[in-house]
Amino acid sequence: MATVVVGVTGGVAAFKAPIVVRECQRAGHDVYVAATRASLEFVGRSTWEGITSRPVAVEIAGEGRAEHVELARIADLIIVVPATANSLARLAAGFADDMVSLTVLASHAPVVVAPAMHSNMWLAPATQANVRTLRERGIHVIDPSSGALGSGDSGIGRLPDPEEIAHQALEVLSAYEQASHALAGRTVVVTAGGTREPIDPVRFLGNQSSGRQGLAIASAAARAGAAVRVIAANIESALLAGLPSGVQVTRVGNALQMREATVNQVADADALVMTAAVADFRPEAASQSKIKKDPTNEEAPTIRLVRNPDILAEIGHSKKRPPLVIGFAAETGTDEEILAYGADKATRKGADFICLNRVGESVGFGDVSNDIHILDANGHIVGRYVGSKDEVAAGLVGHMASFLDNLKR
Ligand code: C5P
């Protein structure tokens, strides 16, 4: 039995929300209701209190509630039904001045949102942008259906059947519960960010990698129950602060430091995921002092580069490699070209899988933020994950879990 919080906002479709509550109760779950004040115009307190046998949470302070985040803490699943255009905007912006948006903001539970509104409001660019933001954050937004609307018009924006909303929401809950144990007992090392190879004390050769995809994978692996170690090359502190508690972070600067940290940390690990952009070359020797231009001489200095070790290939081919080694490859070119590069990389590096990521495309309205093909050691496509970095990370973690589970047998 799980604890489900149903958040009700102020639209005419609110009259269908009690059926969602009832369906969750029928499935054996304990249901609490949080309601915005505006929603009480549509469905009153006595209805909610009658069907849940407990007070409905409306006011943030008072009403005997020990703490305003109590519902957020006990929720295993939050269903916002109906979600008005206004409440979608508030959820996307992170408002917390009503019990519904506050509970969503403060909770780590999966969130399912069922919007209902007039077609013009649903199709408005602002609403579509808010929906995209919520989906990118991993919130499950159920598309409204088409038909008669509360205004008397007809079109898209109608709340789907409440039984169907409850069914989809409970499926999200069970997928989440399954995923939250998928890597229990495993140790996963993730390299992330981009190395900086010093030229002198103030200059370096670097790259654009932010580390976001690697951190999303580390977070997903931690949520799946793994002990996670991140080797972070030049990642902003604010991004690292978003990692789940318990994730161990080792900060490194350049490729040689990353090699040392990675070799040390994979010794007892089950999996290594190398998302970091490691510089292939470094200046042969970093100058001890800042390189100056000579005012009497127009010539520029020559910086001699030497090869960096290929950490992935070294670990991939080592006898002491973890049972699962995954590399990343960001490539430009046609579909055929990038698949050929990826296949070559998978075989050369001794990795079990290479995640192949097309880069350099312009991403337009409605497009997704990442599209990863997974190639096996023979260069065959064995999976594809499309969506936000969090969605791609969750897909990859599922793939890792089934690979490791199959090894056991
Ligand atoms: O050869 P390429 O740099 O495209 O390969 C990318 C993969 O190899 C990534 O997983 C990256 O982390 C890893 N790599 C490495 N050491 C290097 C260069 C890349 O481990 N010197």
Image (cartoon, rainbow, N blue to C red):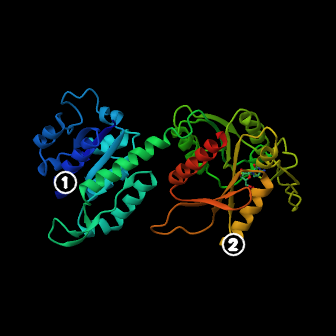
Helix or strand or loop: what does disc 2 sit on?
A: helix
Residue 216 spot, x, y in % from top left: 55, 47
Q: Is residue 37 left or right of residue 226?
A: left
Disc 1 marks which residue?
16
Position of 72 relative to 36 (above/below): above
Q: Is residue 312 left or right of residue 241?
A: right
Residue 142 spot, x, y in % from top left: 34, 58
Position of 209 relative to 218 (above/below): below
Tell me: is circle 2 under 8 Å from ligand 1: no
Q: How many numbered markers are drawn?
A: 2
Q: Residue furthest front?
A: 409
Position of 360 relative to 175 (above/below): below
* Residue 241 visible in the snapshot: no
Residue 46 spot, x, y in % from top left: 10, 40
Q: Toward the viewer: 277 or 21?
A: 21
Q: Is residue 214 left or right of residue 93?
A: right
* Residue 25 image-quadrant placement: top left
* Residue 271 image-quadrant placement: top right
Q: Toward the viewer: 31 or 83?
A: 31
Classify 10 Å Cα crowding around label 1: few (below 14), some (14-19), many (20 and above): some
* Residue 66 visible in the snapshot: yes
Q: Residue at x 58, y 34 (%)?
A: 247
Q: Residue at x 25, y 60 (%)?
A: 159
Residue 15 spot, x, y in % from top left: 16, 53
Quadrant showing the C terminus: top right
Disc 2 marks which residue?
336
Give the alpha-carbon distance from disc 2 to disc 1, as whole Å.
Answer: 50 Å
